[in-house]
Amino acid sequence: MEKWTVIRSEYLHESPFGNVRRDHCRLSNGKEIHDYIIHEYLNWGNVVAITKQHELVLVKQYRHGLSDFVYELPAGGMAEAEDPEQAAIRELREETGYTSARQPIFLGEYGVNPAACTNKIYSYLLLDCEQSERQELDETEELEVVLVPFADALRFLQKETSIQLFSIAALLLAKEKLKELGIKMSSDDSR
């Protein structure tokens, strides 16, 4: 198995929200694909932020692609040279006003949709979060901060119709990491 060879590439659309390009590719078996569409996006950072009261910090916002309101972890794009951990912490602070004195725990780096998108998401777990600042939303952002008991977060999200998939993935990774670290998150636990 070998990587595909790009014979020709052209941009169909370029914008601050992402680029769309069409590649003409040759596969290792010699077959060619003339119109393979690639979406170029910035890498993202997201945070499983848990408060001192063991609540998960979520945001609810309108997502035009689904034409619906979606529950997500605080997340956002990072500048090309920006450190993923710092980007994730910045997005948490800007979108929710929540911060923590604790060191973030790295959960992983994953392709968002590697078949057609160039970006990756970097996921972190951050404990003992407190709302210490005001939101600093971009001019195109309107979102609501939603707190859910961490122990009930998956059940809560399963009842909702529109949830961002990589938020669910990061939440599952965080649950495993907490178990590995011996940290319990039920509402009656005291850490």
Image (cartoon, grey):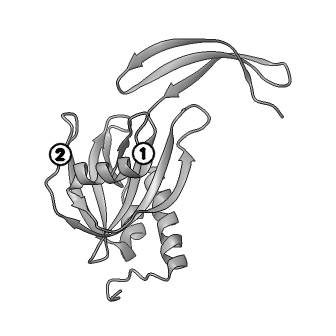
Q: Is residue 163 visible?
A: no
Could you tell whether 110 is left or right of 46 in the image? right
Q: Is residue 126 visible?
A: yes
Label at residue 143: none
Disc 1 element: loop
Q: Quadrant of residue 14?
A: top left
Could you tell whether 19 is left or right of 113 in the image? left
Could you tell whether 155 is left or right of 4 in the image? left
Q: Position of residue 57 (x, y in %)?
A: 29, 63
Count neighbours of disc 2 (C-alpha within 10 A) and say few if under 14, some if 14 to 19, many if 20 or more: few
**Mark 2 residue type:** Glu
User: Disc 2, disc 1: CB below 8 Å?
Assistant: no
Q: Is residue 77 above or below residue 186?
A: above
Q: Position of residue 46 (x, y in %)?
A: 40, 52
Could you tell whether 58 is left or right of 130 in the image? right
**Mark 1 residue type:** Asp
| Location of mark 1 (residue) | 83
Disc 2 element: loop
> Which residue is pictured at 35% across the width and 88% down the height?
189
Label at residue 136: 2
Quadrant assignment for the C terminus: bottom left
Camera-near label (2 vs 1) is: 1
Q: Is residue 77 above or below residue 176?
A: above
Q: Position of residue 99 (x, y in %)?
A: 25, 61
Real-space Cα distance between discs 2 and 1? Answer: 20 Å
> Which residue is pictured at 32% across the width and 83% down the height?
187
